[in-house]
């Protein structure tokens, strides 16, 4: 996938262009021998870990829209080149090499394997190109290796804890209904994202910890990884149904919405006469629909729109040699943390776009 967003710059008067050039002095330089970047064009290379991931594809949609809006506002052209790493680190490193060889102004990397971040950093630093990691968080030691390295994402511990909060509130308000076997203990199952992914590890831990910290007794009935994937989650839950586990499960925590929807698919396909309380993370469009239909109980917003906005704002500032702290809120000089919120039927209308 390689998209060029058309712009309004061709309509700019020559004098306006001269002003732009004086405002953005680094732009006639090419970083490592590739084609020089035109003064009025920012080229951003975006490499995704996997384009078919529901959450990532919503980040992409937001990136395209946000870049278009920024073009109109800043009166320049933003060329987003978006490529799919297809869950293969070698492929992604080749994509990074290609962007750098072609003199892209900024790289945005949704890294396949977080342990490979150092290699990407070395390449970008050698070419003098700013690097923005997003959604898949490298270790802090890597992020701190230079001043042109950033991470844009959501704090996984925080949104995991908020997912736990959703369940805690439901338990406190309606224990009689939720505690189906009436033993005072919350029996749960956990659907985990990709092993080793920060968001999977921390959401798994902190969702349950919120309940235990509040004094709720819990019992894990089942848990498995489904790699963020709806089909895999559905297969795991079908197995739980066959094993007779689903009759005991009062709550299903899912590290993301797609897997939560997979659980619902399996339960409905098996003709379950009731659904346990199921919670996800992301607030994807299908998840919001499922909440509206009364199937998914709730989710935690993983702000794809805010993520895209921060990436575009950061890219523009870095390219223009401006202080990024002027356009985004930076923590520890390298991190942009996006806010997260809980979503249930009660406040759903705030999140539905149509
Ligand atoms: C999202 C998942 C997504 C994963 C990809 C997580 O933050 O919640 O839906 O699959 O990122 O890296
Ligand atoms: Ca119980």
Image (cartoon, rainbow, N blue to C red):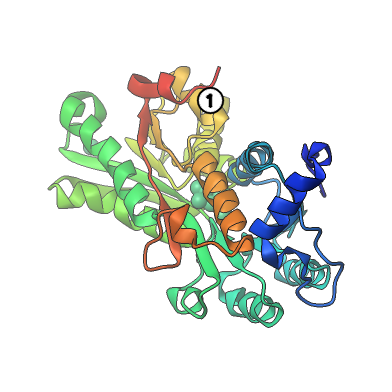
Q: Is residue 350 left or right of residue 195?
A: left
Regarding ligand 2, which quadrant of the image does it lie in? top left
At 32% across and 35% down in the image, what residue appears? 250
Instruction: Provide the residue designation for mark 1.
Output: 268
Nearest the eye: 217 or 134: 134
Q: Secondary structure at mark 1?
A: helix
State which quarter of the image contains the C terminus.
top right
Q: Is residue 294 above or below residue 155?
A: above
Nearest the eye: 131 or 40: 40
Q: Residues within 10 Å of mark 1 (few under 14, many from 20)?
A: some
Nearest the eye: 26 or 112: 26
At 64% across and 64% down in the image, what residue appears? 112
Residue 117: name its quadrant: bottom right
At 49% across and 43% down in the image, what residue appears? 306
At 21% across and 46% down in the image, what residue appears? 211
Q: Position of residue 69 (x, y in %)?
A: 64, 36
Q: Is residue 326 visible?
A: yes
Q: Is residue 37 above or below residue 353?
A: below
Nearest the eye: 85 or 175: 85
Q: Position of residue 262 (x, y in %)?
A: 55, 37
Residue 269: name its quadrant: top right
Q: Position of residue 198 (x, y in %)?
A: 45, 62
Q: Is residue 228 left or right of residue 296?
A: right
**Farthest residue in the front direction?**
15
């Amino acid at each position: 996938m390689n998209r060029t967003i058309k712009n309004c710059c061709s309509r700019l008067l020559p004098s306006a262009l001269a002003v732009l050039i004086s405002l953005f002095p680094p732009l006639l330089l090419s970083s490592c021998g590739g084609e020089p970047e035109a003064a009025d064009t920012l080229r951003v290379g975006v490499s995704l870990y996997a384009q078919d991931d529901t959450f990532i594809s919503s980040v992409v949609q937001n990136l395209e829209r946000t870049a278009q809006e920024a073009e109109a506002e800043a009166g320049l052209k933003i060329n987003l080149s978006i490529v799919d790493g297809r869950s293969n680190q070698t492929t992604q490193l080749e994509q990074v090499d290609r962007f750098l060889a072609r003199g892209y102004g900024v790289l945005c990397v949704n890294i396949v394997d977080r342990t490979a971040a150092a290699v990407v950093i070395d390449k970008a630093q050698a070419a003098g190109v700013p690097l923005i990691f997003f959604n898949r968080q490298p270790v802090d030691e890597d992020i701190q290796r230079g001043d042109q390295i950033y991470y844009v994402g959501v704090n996984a511990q925080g949104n995991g804890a908020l997912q736990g909060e959703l369940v805690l509130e439901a338990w406190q308000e309606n224990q009689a209904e939720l505690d189906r076997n009436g033993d005072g203990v919350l029996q749960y199952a956990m659907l985990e994202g990709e092993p080793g992914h920060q968001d999977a590890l921390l959401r798994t831990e902190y969702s349950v910890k919120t309940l235990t910290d509040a004094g709720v007794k819990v019992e894990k009935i089942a848990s498995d990884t489904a790699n963020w994937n709806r089909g895999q989650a559905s297969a795991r839950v079908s197995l739980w149904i066959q094993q007779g586990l689903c009759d005991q499960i009062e709550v299903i925590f899912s590290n993301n919405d797609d897997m939560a929807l997979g659980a619902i698919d399996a339960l409905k396909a098996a003709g379950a006469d009731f659904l346990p309380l199921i919670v996800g993370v992301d607030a994807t469009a299908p998840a919001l629909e499922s909440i509206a239909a009364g199937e998914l109980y709730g989710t935690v917003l993983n702000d794809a729109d805010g993520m895209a906005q921060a990436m575009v704002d950061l890219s523009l500032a870095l390219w223009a040699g401006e202080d990024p702290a002027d356009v985004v809120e930076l923590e520890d000089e390298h991190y942009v943390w996006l806010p997260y919120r809980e979503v249930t039927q009660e406040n759903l209308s705030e999140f539905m776009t149509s």
